[in-house]
Every structure is written in structure tokens, then in C-alpha cells.
Amino acid sequence: MFVPENLKSRTVTAAAALFALAGMLSGCSTLPTDSPIEPVDYRACLVTDGDANRIGINDSSLYSLNQAVVTFGIQKTVVATNPSKFEATMDRLVKAKCNLISVVGSRFAESLAGVVSANPQTHFLFITDGSDQKILAADLENLAVYRIDVYQAGLLAGHLAASLSENRELGVVCGNSVNLRYLAGVRAGAAAFDTQNVLTTRITSDGNLNGLTDVILNYGCRDQIPTGDAYASGFKLVGFGRDLYFDSAFENQKALIAATVIPQAGPRLLELIAADLESEFIGGPLGSTVASFSNGGLAISQEHEVAFPAGELEALKDLATQYEISLK
């Protein structure tokens, strides 16, 4: 079931208009001295499972939290933790009077409902690439949920990667941490491409790439561009998370970046902060969104030096539509 985006307000519209400016300043941790934005008495807190800079939903959320700081004049707190320390971390943030606490990571799902229920005066956002059914069933009015459809993200990435492969060899990297639902989606996406084009594409997921692997896919990797001897030969990259093509850190590797499947977790966080500042926070089932392709929760970055085959974007839209219809 796909829940449409319900968060509509004049503040959200204003936030969208300021995205371009905020993007230029998003690396800042404090307001620039010449900024026309006045500081406000509001603190947004971000809790991530592991390093907040890890590629994927973590760094997407951090990026947009920084945008909110320089766009709205709010304060921020960022804490990286793990499930064993989660409740203690949340207790500290509630005592620190965070107005909104955004929790990023599926492993926190088991403990989150109790924390949210015990703190009705605090607003929460849960960003997850796992199941959200238990959280939604709790029907907590001070909690909004944003769930990335991981299988569909893989479906899009797999089809796109197969369309770019000349050797019919794909590699899904990140060692033993490969998300199995993402991998299943990649396999289904590549199989759909093969069926359409009467081809056979091989997918490796154990990190033992051979010399023929010419398209690499990552999901939740710490580094967007894989390194090491296994990746010494040329390849194209289909990433997941923020599109880092214009990041100066990858200046010498731009030709490798073919495309990125981008979850809009960060923009969702920015929208929610904007709404909360206007006292228009919406929680419970009405504030929850499934990040799918059709409702704008997943996007495909524009091709860069690596051109997509003719008709590939249209094929991806058709693939997403067929998948979403199958769920209804």
C-alpha cells in the first residue's frame, strides 16, 4: 500500500524554493555571519545507526539537516549510535529539549515505539530501509515514518546497471553488509532487462569480482567509490544515496559515476522541519510515506559522462509502475 505525500504547507513550498541556496551552504555547521536568516529557538536532532556520513540514508539526512540550519536558522545535534545504546541516547536528546528527533536506521525499530510513546511532547521522524509495520500499528501522533522501498531501489538499479553493462557482469559491493532485499531487487531488475533484450547478466555479491565486471552497484557503503585492487580496472558505478558527481572529492573519478538511485530521505526531513516550525507537524499514519518511484520518494540522477541507452529512463518508469501495481 502506498501512502501519498500528505505534508503540504506554505512552509514546505518555501523550503523547496530555498533548496538551491541551501545546497550551496549545506557543508556549513553554523550560520554564516552575513546570513539574513535570524537564529530561532528550535533544535532538530539526528540519530544515525553508525557514522552519520555513511553513504545512503544517513548522509542524505545529515545533508538536509545542515540545509535546515542555514535555511531556517535552527540549531542541530547529530549523534551516531547503535541499538544497544539507543534508549540512553534518546533519553539524553529528550532532556536536551530537541524539538524534533529524526531516527535513521531500521535496527532502531524495536525500541522506537516505546521512546516515542513516553515523550508525547517531542516530535519524531523515523527513516528506515526496513519494515515499518510495527511502528505504523502503534499509531503514534507524534511520529512520522519515511520508509524506503529497498526492493524497488534495487529493481531500478539492477535494470539500469544491466543496460550499461557490455560484459554482462555486475558486482554488488559492501562485503557482508549487502542488503538482501536490495540485492533481490537488483537481480529482478537485471532479469527484467535480460528478458526484454534476450541476454544473460551475471551478478556477483560476495566481493570476489572478476576482470569482466564492468558495472558496480553499492548500497549503504561507507565510500561511494570502491577502492582496492579488485576495483583497479575500469568500471561504471550505479550508486545509492546522494549523487556525489559534483563533489570535489571525486574529481578524478567522475567518469566512473553512471547514475545514482536517490532516496529523498533528506528532503523529507527538511520538509518536516519546515512544517514543525509552522506548528503543522503531521504524525501517525497520515504523516507516513513509502519512498517509491511514482510518488517521488526515489529518483534517478541524470546520466553524466556515461550516457544511458536510448529509452532506458522510460523503461525504468514502466518497470516501477508494473511493480507498484503488483502491490495494490
Image: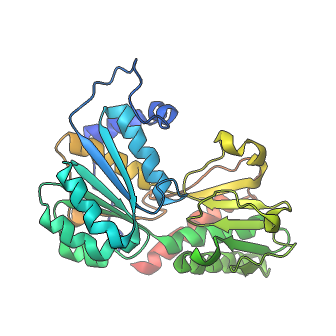
Q: Quadrant of residue 81?
A: bottom left
Given the current orientation, which residue lies at the most extreme top position? 34
**Residue nearest the observer in this picture, 64 or 325:** 64
Direction from residue 106 to residue 226 in the image, left or right: right
Position of residue 277 relative to residue 94, above or below, is: above
Which residue is rendered at x = 19% and y = 74% of the image? 138
Query: In this rendering, does residue 287 appear at all?
Result: no
Residue 285 percent coordinates (x, y) = 23, 67
Query: In this rendering, does residue 253 appear at all?
Result: yes
Q: Quadrant of the N terminus?
A: bottom left
**Residue nearest the observer in this picture, 22 or 9:** 22
Which residue is rendered at x = 33% and y = 68% of the image? 85
Residue 214 percent coordinates (x, y) = 81, 67
Direction from residue 18 to residue 90 in the image, left or right: left
Direction from residue 70 to residue 205 in the image, left or right: right
Q: How many marks?
A: 0
Q: Quadrant of the C terminus?
A: bottom left
**Residue nearest the observer in this picture, 37 or 169:** 37
Residue 17 percent coordinates (x, y) = 40, 34
**Residue nearest the observer in this picture, 161 or 44:** 44
Residue 84 percent coordinates (x, y) = 34, 73
Which residue is rendered at x = 76% and y = 48% of the image? 253
Q: Which color scheme did the rendering employ for the protein?
A: rainbow
Position of residue 296 relative to residue 128, above or below, is: above
Position of residue 186 relative to residue 60, above or below, is: below
